Image (tube, helix red, strand yellow):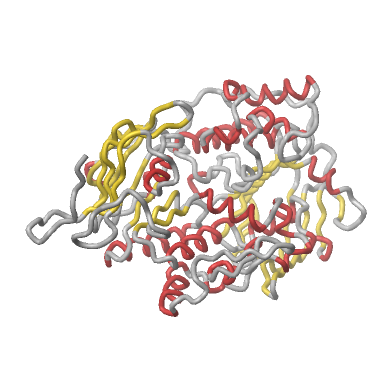
Amino acid sequence: MKHRPMNSKADNSPAPLAVFEDVSLQANGKTLFDGLNWTLEAGQNWTVFGPNGSGKSFLAKALFRSIPLVRGRILFYFDGPGAQPRTYLKPNEIVRISQDDQKGLMRRYASYHQARWQSFEQDAPTVEDYLKGRARANRFQMRETGEPAAEIPRDAWEQALALFKIEYLLPRRLIHISNGEARKVLIARALLKHPKLLILDDPFTGLDAASRDALAQALNGMARTGTLPFVMLTSREDEILDCSGRVLCVEDSRVIFQGPKKKMPAAGGASPKASSSQPEFKFPAPKEDPAAGFKTLAAMKKVTISYCGEKVLDQVDWVMKPGERWALLGHNGAGKSTLLSLVLADNPQAYANDISLFDVKRGSGENIWEIKRRIGCVSPESQIYHGPDVTCLQAVCSGFFDTVGLYHACSPEQEQTARQWLEGFDLEHLADRSFLALSTGERRLTLLARALVKNPALLALDEPCQGLDARHRARIIRILDELCAQSSMSMIFISHHVDEMPRSITHVLRLEKGRVVECGRRA
């Protein structure tokens, strides 16, 4: 098979960066992207667009050479004019940033979710340590990250900090930064490696509107200067940037279009608000109202939380009563995750504040597991800790015991209830499949079923639609609205997208730099 040489002066065609020649992949016995031919040329930025489970990440992994090819080859033209292409990559020539990297970051520095708020927090590395390769894995084992090099050119360092506006994060512990802040730190770290090509897998996931705009401007700036080409993966059509002149549309692990963005076919799928065509959901009928008898679910008076001398929450007053559904809003770093950690009884600084959960003041001898039994929670981190041997049904059943993984035998009644929730979400056919083998949308629905299976008094949802395509976002929101219509369920809902807010939201709590700027009934 002949390869394409680098263009010479006599050849005015654009120089290639990477070329897929008759490439086929395979996963779970299924052939993916059979016979794909795709050329990434210098000066071009690509967006790979498609719904959850369409194969975008497999394509990125193939380009990154982290999975084998069943057929064909990928040629890389990174050695300059006149050099022969090669089929292998040198370190850091292509850098990929994905949700898996963010999960790995959390796994490395917090072995369980509550560790973000516990007493050994001072052992966790700072953002500056991580960016400069000085982080360690835990208090017992030193582990240098190795990349990027400790000696980073000053101009590159300042450019990365300015590009993502993260200088204020440098002294923060990694385990204390928000989901959106972690995404910006990961991308900044990738840029410090000086790659030839950057792969961004859902880069806007978890970012607030201002941060999304800032990242878009940064990527548009890179495109204008031509300093670093990128391939971006997304399931949201509104995230395809103007600077991404080329689009590869994928569906069911096959390419249905590749070419200029202006010629891209209209995407299908319902928007989150256009969900009336979805089928009616049938949920298990609760035997009792779990919030009955409580005057308040959460009450905070002048709550102040500080880390490294910086106030993350500042004089917060807030009361949540049974039957209320609150949207918790604010920019990245506004204090939403910290406030939620207080509600979930995960943050030890609660004992230094005036906080009551379910009418009981924290620090009065309350049983923390009794608090957790009354709360069902879904967050972007929820799926990090489920191992490869956990099935979809086991993941749901673990919600009865508030464990990650199933370590207790379910009663026949509990298993029946878990299967009813899977059936209500149209997931019963996936009951015996590995949780990690599910698509992103299927995992999120499974985690929602897990949170609901114990009939909680409070449902806490931290970015439940994060990383989902339009169809799955619409499905999640419709489920929540129907749950609220059929019950007196209380809910806290966090999102950075206003179009993802369920109609059933009754109240809004908005934070800005740790202070309450809006609190009351939804307008």
Name the foreground residue: 162 vs 385: 385
Asked if residue 453 shows in the view, the reply is yes
Judge from the rendering whether residue 60 lies leftward or rightward of residue 337; answer left or right.
left
As drawn, which residue projects farthest toward the left? 10
Residue 197 pos. (x, y %): 35, 57
Note whether 443 is above or below 362 in the view shown.
above
Judge from the rendering whether residue 431 lies leftward or rightward of residue 234; answer left or right.
right
Residue 329 pos. (x, y %): 58, 55
Name the foreground residue: 128 vs 63: 63
Residue 159 pos. (x, y %): 42, 74
Judge from the rendering whether residue 477 lies leftward or rightward of residue 389; answer left or right.
left
Query: In the picture, which quadrant includes the N terminus?
Result: top left
- Seen at 45% across and 32% down, the residue is 27
- Seen at 69% across and 41% down, the residue is 459
Asked if residue 455 shows in the view, the reply is no
Judge from the rendering whether residue 361 lies leftward or rightward of residue 2; answer left or right.
right
Note whether 291 is above or below 288 in the view shown.
below
Note whether 171 is above or below 276 in the view shown.
below
Name the foreground residue: 128 vs 196: 196
As drawn, which residue projects farthest toward the right? 365
Q: In which quarter of the image is residue 387?
A: top right
- Seen at 78% across and 21% down, the residue is 413
Q: In which quarter of the image is residue 392?
A: top right
Instruction: Tally the numbered discs.
Output: 0
Name the foreground residue: 86 vs 165: 86
Residue 53 pos. (x, y %): 45, 34
